[in-house]
Amino acid sequence: MKNLTVYYGTPKQGILPAFFSECLDITDPVFTFDRFMEGIDLRKYLSKLPAHELGRIRYNPVNMLKTVLFGFMDEGCISLRKLEDNCKVNIRYKYLMDGKRPSYRTFGYFINTVLMNQAESLFYEITQEIITKEHVDLDHIYIDGSKFEANANKYSWVWKKGTEKSRFRLFAKISVLLEEINEMLSCSGLKAEINSEYAPEYLELILSQLHEIWNLDEERFVHGRGHHKSPEQRNYEKLKAYLQKLKEYGKKLSICGENRNSYSKTDHSATFMRIKRDYMGNDQLLPAYNVQVGIADEYIAVLDVNQYRSDMDCFVPLLEKFYEHHGIYPKYPVADAGYGSFNNYLYCSEHGMEACMKFPMFFKETTDKKYHEDPFRAVNFKTTADGTLICPNGKKFKFVYRKNIQGNQYGRQEEIYECEDCNGCPYAERCKKTPHNRRISLNRELTKVHADVIGRLTDTRGFLLRRNRAIQAEGTFGVMKHDREYDRIVRRGMDSVKMEVFLVSIGFNLYKYHRKQQVHMDMAA
């Protein structure tokens, strides 16, 4: 006879212990994270949370903040829905949240409320704690930048030069229209002033005066087929349309600002930049942000998000941030040729730093002996005791004038020299490209700086610094983009983008910290 006993239990019941920590190994990253966070006062970042008096009991904000930070440590860049799902099924997140399961909307509200303007402060406090515990060397900073594609439409943008050209064409149309209006007002003795450029306020004044002079009533204006507009209505509406277009151009130019040449229509903070899209180095013009990092002992010691297309303009702001948060300047800022400008070299000299940045022609100067020793280069011309330059044919170069170096912030100038006579010179084909006497531009300060940089980077220490920069700085972006799968900005707007990048960087530093702690434990065992 069959056993008819009914079992109401299942084999899966009673497996989970009373404490989530019992399910985790002692070397689990969540324990490393939790122990580290004991040294950080997280409650001071929760002051922006609104008072909670009614409704359900809110989730523990400290646990919420820990869960968010651990999510970025664990995943690289974690989505809100993934956070919600992990709190339901992942023991690590259950441990941090004490078994509570907030929704993705709750996490989103928490992040936007607490971390929007405090992510940077939190990043530097966590980084400073790591620097203290790991005895990080801040004298050597390895600098690199990478462009991250923005969350914006890549086919719609505003080009600054195109906008300026369109605005000047509009100025010409306004001038033609004002001339026609002046002809209509000739009998009244009034006249609108014709200029090469116009301000919106000036056109608004003209419109208000025309409204009174012509006694216009916009409600009685005729529109559509079969209706004949009066000259007054036609010119008034045309000037009003020009005014709206002029305001639109002005708004676009103000969004671009002085330092940008474009912006995306769907994310005004994103600038169109050249980004490498495949392994062949092919690039595309895409909306992006320029993320700059300074690496010290594999940790991100300083971070900045810029709208500049060139890394050269990002060097000074990055080091100023470094000084702001660490109180010192690095002794050896190491960077590639994208940062090697005269301004940056002078900036390093003024602040007691030894510039370890290559310049664009560094590789050719150090590897191409023929180019380096070329006698027809201006820097290789012989110089007499009184400073006169002598070409290979023995002709003197006389000083012509000085001109300001474009974009230089220190008022530096370069000197222009001209050969006294190039007629009949046997080296003319090799020396110059025009039929006139050869002219050269010379910046003796820059030449001396380049020589110092070559001497500094070609010795043993310089070789090790360059090699280490390639490993640490470029390796950081490699881990961030490929290993941790963060290669595209998710949020829009500069404030939101900065918050996101700082959270990702916090996660990266904590991830590195855990990996190094594991190495120490393995060595101790």
Image (cartoon, rainbow, N blue to C red):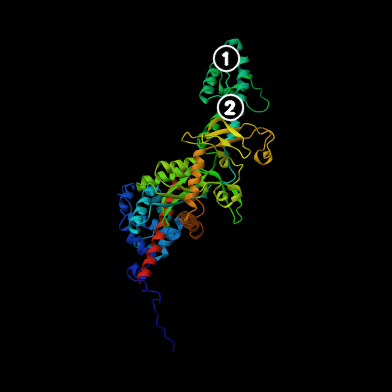
Residue 517, image quadrant = bottom left
Counting from the top left corner in percent of width and height, residue 95 is at: 35, 64
246 or 263: nearer the eye? 263
1 or 279: nearer the eye? 279
Which residue is the site of mark 2?
242
Q: Distance between the residues labelled 1 and 2?
A: 19 Å
Counting from the top left corner in percent of width and height, residue 77 is at: 46, 56
The N terminus - image quarter: bottom left
* Left or right of 135 on screen, residue 203: right
Residue drawn where x is 37% and y is 50% of the image = 124
129 or 489: nearer the eye? 129
Instruction: Say what amino acid the circle numbered 2 marks.
Output: Tyr
Image height of 181 relative to 435, above or below: above
Residue drawn where x is 41% and y is 41% of the image = 350
- Give the SS element for disc 2: helix
Residue drawn where x is 51% and y is 54% of the image = 487
**How packed is label 2: few (under 14 Cα within 10 Å), some, or many (20 or more)?**
some
Counting from the top left corner in percent of width and height, residue 53 is at: 30, 49
The C terminus - image quarter: bottom left
* Left or right of 205 on screen, residue 45: left
Which residue is the site of mark 1?
191
The residue positioned farthest toward the bottom in the image shown: 1
506 or 467: nearer the eye? 467
Counting from the top left corner in percent of width and height, residue 80 is at: 44, 55
Marks 1 and 2, the one that precedes in the sequence = 1
Image height of 129 relative to 377, above or below: below
